[in-house]
């Protein structure tokens, strides 16, 4: 059982890393177009094979935005110079990734941005493997903190953040806390008790399913 999980993890990690590299070649191309012609918005699609015959399509839009504080995208890192949002369209197996970059802060922003991209991609792959293998096609959407630990989100959230933790060489529980800080700031967690419930559930899932994850506690 553990070996099967480990092999799947290695495969999906590799797919995540390869796709992230391709996305960055695209980001670099769009930067050249921005510098040359002031073209500030570009889109592209990538077809990703998780394992034959399961695949999904990533539609990516990259925009240069020197006023990132006005960005409407969900995750914003003004200091590093990017914002990012992800949405999936389960009926079409499509995944939409939107990125805005402050052109002044490139390429210094790329390492941190890559962590978020890996998190979102791995998260999405988890949903797709869930829907293909376990028949979870229509996700019941819970509200507030319950969403973060719902049966459809739990493994996707944790595995996404695990990909980010590996990229940043951080402890997974530190990445959980950074994420929870952000969600709390956004007002999606109401109090410390809700935060603790989510955190504990993520840790429990990690200990049960990700034997190689590095935890502080
Ligand atoms: Zn999700």
Image (cartoon, rainbow, N blue to C red):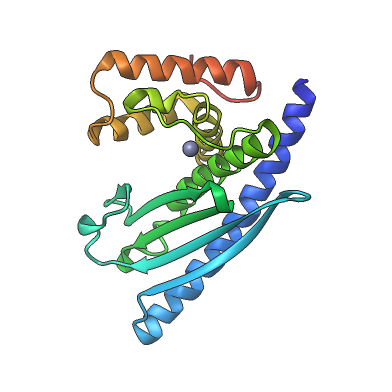
| Residue at the bottom extreme, as displayed | 37
The image quadrant of residue 200 is top left
Position of 214 relative to 40 (above/below): above
The image quadrant of residue 57 is bottom right
Quarter of the figure with the N terminus: top right
Whether residue 133 is visible:
yes
- 200 lies left or right of 143: right
Where's residue 9, x and y in %? Answer: 69, 35
The image quadrant of residue 193 is top left
Position of 205 relative to 117 (above/below): above
Foreground: 163 or 50? 50
Foreground: 53 or 50? 53
Which residue corresponds to the image point at 43% horizontal and 81% vertical from the top-left? 33
Which residue corresponds to the image point at 26% horizontal and 57% vertical from the top-left? 71
- 87 lies left or right of 125: left
Position of 203 relative to 172 (above/below): above
Foreground: 197 or 68? 197
Where's residue 55, x and y in %? Answer: 68, 52
Position of 138 relative to 33 (above/below): above
* Badge count: 0
Where's residue 17, x and y in %? Answer: 62, 50
Where's residue 63, x and y in %? Answer: 36, 67
Whether residue 216 is visible:
no
Which residue corresponds to the image point at 42% horizontal and 63% vertical from the top-left? 107
């Amino acid at each position: 059982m553990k070996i099967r999980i480990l092999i799947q993890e290695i495969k999906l990690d590799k797919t995540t890393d390869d796709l992230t590299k391709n996305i960055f070649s695209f980001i670099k191309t769009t930067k050249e177009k921005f510098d040359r012609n002031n073209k500030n918005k570009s889109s592209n699609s990538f077809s990703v094979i998780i394992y034959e015959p399961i695949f999904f399509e990533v539609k990516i839009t990259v925009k240069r935005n020197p006023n990132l504080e006005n960005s409407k995208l969900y995750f914003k890192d003004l200091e590093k110079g990017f914002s990012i949002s992800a949405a999936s369209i389960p009926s079409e197996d499509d995944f939409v990734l939107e990125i805005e970059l402050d052109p002044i802060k490139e390429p210094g922003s790329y390492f941190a941005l890559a962590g978020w991209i890996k998190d979102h991609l791995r998260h999405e792959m988890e949903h797709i493997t869930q829907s293909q293998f376990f028949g979870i096609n229509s996700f019941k959407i819970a509200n507030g903190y319950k969403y973060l630990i719902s049966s459809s989100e739990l493994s996707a959230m944790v595995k996404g953040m695990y990909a980010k933790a590996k990229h940043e060489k951080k402890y997974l529980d530190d990445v959980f806390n950074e994420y929870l800080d952000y969600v709390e700031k956004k007002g999606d967690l109401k109090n410390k008790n809700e935060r603790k419930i989510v955190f504990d559930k993520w840790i429990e899932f990690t200990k049960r399913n990700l034997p190689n994850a590095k935890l502080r506690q």
